[in-house]
Image (cartoon, rainbow, N blue to C red):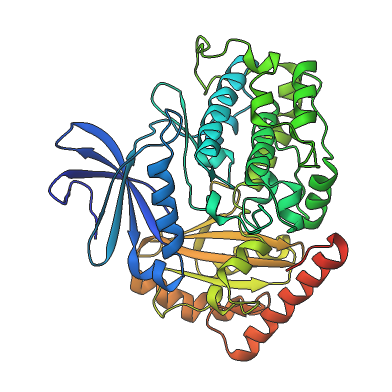
Amino acid sequence: MEKKGSILLERYELGKLLGQGNFAKVYYAKDLKKFQNVAIKVIDKEKTLKAGLSEQIKREISVMKMAKHKNVLQLYEVMATKTKIYIVLEYAKGGELFNKVAKGRLKEDIARWIFQQLISAVDCCHSGGVYHRDLKLENLLIDEDGSLKVSDFGLSALIDSKRQDGLLHTMCGTPAYVAPEVINRRGYDGAKADIWSCGVILYVLLAGHLPFQDSNLIEMYKKITRADYRCPNWFPPEVRRLLLKILDPNPKTRIPISKIMENPWFKKGLGTRPAPARLAKVESTEAKLSEGNAIEKQFELSKPSNLNAFDIISLSSGLDLSGLFVADDGREDIRFTSIEPISVIVAKLEEVASELKLKVSKKDGGFLKLVSSGGRRVELGIDIDIFEVTPSFHVVEMKRANGNAFYYQKMLKDGMQPALKDIVWAWQGDSTQSRFKEKRCMSNFLCKLKFMYDVEF
């Protein structure tokens, strides 16, 4: 187990945990030989093998080795032991661009500077036959100088991934940023799909919110297909015209990167860092103040809702959701599905927390954190996330944030699981009958997608 201050493979001194997912953790570290700061992604081999993600990790590593550009996060080294893979990466001190823009829209010159760097990095990748396929604010990092670093090539595709028709056919990406042709699943040009995502990013940088956003996944896909968005009144006419060409729902007529680079607005101040180029400083206008709460709410709701129908399909075999909902006994996180509205789910969780003498507080991202109250001897913290698959189908995930693991497991088994039965459709690891219900629910959802949106699965 990696601990702060420990020396990894006689070279890297581990620091604080920067982030973690189901299969990997990312640590800040110091290279004791080169005396530089790095980030180390520690991947659990067994978990990735079980999830069938080994090829994805190999692809991510090979792509990062190929993509050499000042605005692409640099891969320094890859090491492995019997149980872990260690990917040593360039350290981007500024963190995710998402966190900067969530505070408010950027000034035009700073937004343009970021967009110029993004286009330059994506153009380099495309020239090498690499298509990112998941460009979004969360995958764009900022270094100490405020420069952009494109990261997370886990969903990227190489030019040899194309079929005989010359197109890619894998459905991937984050819904709000994904191009219409990717959703339609009729084959798509990876370069054109990345350009669309760049257009969405440009819009967000200048507006402070997403162009295509709807709590109903089907409605959001309809908006994307029609390119149904509105530019705020502070958008310059040159930007509106450029976005019209980038967010063109027809990939055949969508502007290529070469033409974006020739655009007068894009070329303005090219290569010149705005002064002061501080991303945390946002434009303060009456328009921003009037939309502040709505912007904050849109970002608050959009970030945790990463689990969608296509994520579930990719994690499952066919439509069998057992791969998502079955876990080993004693694991730190547990999930259940519910067909209740999100308001009912939250109300029930708060009620059960009160009965178990747990204090409820809002967590980053808008969901819940349960902590043991003063009357309890055993400290415990539980993070709860709620993911909307459809307006009538949710996945609720509970994780132990801190405290005694044994007490956490006991509270789940004896307290929370029985008390939540009124809102639970199926717990992870339930019987075959429960899995049948999950399968039937997802089947109905996919049929609805096919009927309303002509999506083939």
Q: Is residue 373 visible?
A: no
- Residue at 51 percent across and 38 percent down: it is 125
Give whichever of 142, 261 is nearer the camera.
Answer: 261
Counting from the top left corner in percent of width and height, residue 211 is at 75, 37
Q: Left of 279 or right of it: where is 242?
A: right
- Residue at 18 percent across and 46 percent down: it is 5
- Is residue 210 positioned above or below 214 on the image? above
Counting from the top left corner in percent of width and height, residue 272 is at 51, 11
Counting from the top left corner in percent of width and height, residue 2 is at 24, 55
Give whichever of 454, 190 is nearer the camera.
Answer: 190
Give whichever of 74, 286 is nearer the camera.
Answer: 74
- Is residue 398 positioned above or below 67 on the image? below
Counting from the top left corner in percent of width and height, residue 239 is at 74, 21
- Is residue 424 positioned above or below 136 on the image? below
Q: Is residue 259 visible?
A: yes
Q: Quadrant of residue 420?
A: bottom right
Q: Left of 105 or right of it: where is 27?
A: left
Split into 4 quadrants, where in the image is the N terminus?
bottom left
Q: Quadrant of residue 394?
A: bottom right
Split into 4 quadrants, where in the image is the C terminus?
bottom right
